């Protein structure tokens, strides 16, 4: 019985198949084949940064990522302070250079506490189309120093070691669907000496937090972005951010409302936060990638 | 058809392929480049994965490229290009299929001007095009093909956002160069 059915199906297919084979040949067309059968999933996020957190989005070998990040004063100053634009600005410049497709080194400088940070990013795993690697995994580490002149202090100014702080971050991300991407960033920040003079709210040395970044694609070139960073071992308020990413060629513009003025990772964890509605502030990032060297 | 002779099918196929294959010139590593010249930004993209077929006896040509292999030197720009403009997930290939205006008759080491007539397809849209190029017979088994043409993005429903007009040119100049071998 089964054999009969199989035979009938084969028979009905045989002629069209033969025809296809011959037709294909007489019309001399190449079979269309993809060069990479199982490519990596791309653009999990629009840029190597989203709001204040770094992402798993890699840089290609010998390219340089330049980011300007900026947060303003709180919105609740009202129109008198043009909703925060008049004051309290924090600005950070950062350059990140990729030595190969996995490893990059960067340096940043934020105006708040004149803070210099050296950081590295390493991409361990990359999500692929087939799902045999279901998520991307990257590591990030940084060492920074507060370079404010504390000559005004009564006591002795902190030394280099006391001004230093460190951060380590794991980034685990997945493009869940064409529209939705999610990243978890378990983070650890350590201050050698969190002095009251520093522009942070926390007074502990060690801070643990879980960064959560979300992206919802609105159109091909823009996305809604979210950031939530619950603190795991401090009483500080959690960081909340919401924004929009817009791609324009080599640029990615990011505009957001966020509860913190901090732009580097250490201050993001230790800096403290307002609540949405109060101490909520406008911020923006401009990301640009440059090619360097010859290809 | 006698069902018991089904084993003949692959044999017939092999015969056909065997005889037909002998006169085809093919490549899998031809070069493609495009140039975008806009007011504020000029960049090129390249790939060396042009697949091509030239069949002089039957006057047929067929070329395609996996658009995922195009590189502009900035990875993020490549990803945006694939994701937003070319939409390679849906339309991974750019293709050209057609024939030469006149049957080709090549002499050794002499570049001959040719015109290809056919259909160019990219981003899921097709357009009839006439492309000027040249063919050079390098040996009995080798032909060099060079051609250049322009692609207007609007013809293929590839939209440039208004904020991008200074950065991305509507007209892309495309060049191809390939050594096809028997």
Image (tube, coloured by chain):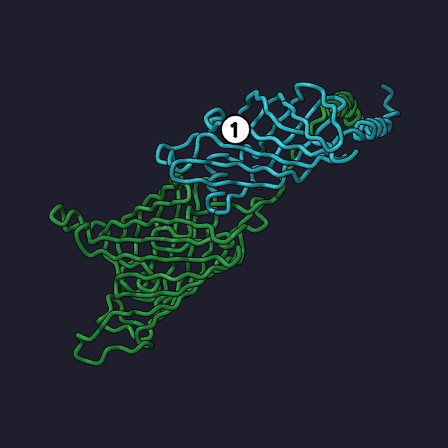
Chain colours: A green, B cyan
Quarter containing the N terminus of chain B: top right
In front: A112, or A212?
A112
Residue B113 picture quarter:
top right
In front: A208, or A104?
A104
Q: Answer with left or right where residue B109 lies relative to residue B36.
A: right
Q: Is residue A217 above or below residue A153?
A: above
Q: Answer with left or right where residue B6 lies relative to residue A185.
A: right
Q: Chain of mark 1?
A: B
Q: Is residue A9 visible?
A: no
Q: Position of residue A21 (x, y in %)?
A: 75, 25
Q: Residue at x 22, y 80 (%)?
A: A156
What residue is shown with label 1?
B150
Q: Position of residue A279 (x, y in %)?
A: 20, 54
Q: Around disc 1, counting alpha carbons within 10 Å, would you say few (fewer than 14), some (14 to 19), or many (20 or more)? A: some
Q: Is residue A145 above or below residue A66?
A: below
| Number of marks present in the image shown | 1
Quarter containing the C terminus of chain B: top right
SS for dot 1: strand
Q: Position of residue A198 (x, y in %)?
A: 24, 69
Q: Is residue A158 visible?
A: yes
Q: Position of residue A239 (x, y in %)?
A: 30, 56
Q: Residue at x 47, y 34 (%)?
A: B85
Extreme residue toward the front, this view: B110
């Amino acid at each position: 019985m089964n054999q009969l059915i199989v035979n009938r199906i084969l028979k009905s297919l045989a002629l069209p198949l033969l025809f296809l084979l011959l037709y294909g040949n007489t019309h001399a067309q190449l079979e269309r084949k993809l060069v990479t059968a199982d490519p990596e999933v791309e653009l999990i996020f629009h840029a190597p940064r989203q709001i204040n957190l770094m992402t798993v989005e890699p840089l290609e070998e010998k390219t340089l990522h330049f980011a300007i990040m900026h947060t303003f004063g709180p919105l609740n100053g009202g129109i008198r302070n043009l909703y925060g634009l008049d004051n309290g600005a924090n600005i950070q410049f950062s350059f990140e250079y990729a030595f190969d497709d996995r490893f990059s080194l960067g340096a940043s400088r934020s105006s708040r506490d004149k803070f210099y940070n050296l950081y590295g990013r390493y991409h361990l795993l990359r999500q692929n189309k087939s799902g045999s690697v279901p998520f991307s995994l990257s590591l990030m580490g940084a060492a920074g120093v507060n370079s404010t002149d504390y000559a005004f202090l009564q006591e002795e100014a902190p030394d280099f070691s006391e001004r230093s702080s460190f951060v380590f971050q794991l980034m685990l991300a997945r493009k869940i669907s064409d529209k939705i991407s999610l990243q978890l960033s378990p983070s650890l920040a350590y201050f050698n000496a969190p002095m009251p003079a520093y522009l942070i709210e926390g007074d502990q040395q060690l801070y643990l937090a879980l960064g959560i970044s979300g992206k919802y694609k609105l159109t091909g070139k823009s996305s809604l972005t979210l950031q939530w960073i619950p603190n795991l071992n401090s009483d500080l308020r959690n960081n909340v951010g919401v924004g929009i990413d817009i791609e324009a060629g080599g640029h990615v513009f990011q505009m957001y409302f966020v509860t913190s003025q901090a732009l580097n990772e250490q201050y993001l964890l230790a800096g403290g936060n307002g609540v949405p509605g109060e101490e909520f502030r406008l911020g923006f990032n401009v990301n640009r990638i440059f090619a360097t060297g010859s290809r | 058809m006698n069902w018991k002779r089904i084993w003949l099918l692959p044999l017939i196929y092999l015969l056909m392929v065997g005889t037909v294959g002998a006169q085809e010139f093919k490549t899998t590593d031809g070069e493609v480049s495009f140039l975008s010249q806009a007011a504020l930004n000029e960049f090129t993209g390249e790939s060396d994965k042009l697949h091509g077929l030239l069949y002089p006896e039957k006057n047929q040509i067929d070329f395609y490229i996996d658009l995922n292999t195009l590189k502009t030197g900035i990875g993020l720009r490549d990803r945006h290009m694939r994701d937003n403009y070319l939409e390679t997930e849906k339309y991974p290939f750019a293709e050209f299929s057609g024939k030469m205006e006149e049957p080709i008759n090549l002499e050794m080491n002499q570049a001959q001007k040719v015109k290809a007539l056919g259909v160019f397809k990219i981003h899921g849209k097709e357009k009839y095009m006439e492309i000027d190029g040249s063919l050079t017979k390098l040996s009995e088994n080798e032909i060099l093909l060079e051609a250049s043409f322009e692609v207007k993005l609007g013809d293929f429903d590839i939209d440039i956002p208004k904020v991008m007009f200074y950065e991305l040119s509507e007209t892309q100049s495309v060049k191809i160069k390939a050594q096809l071998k028997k």
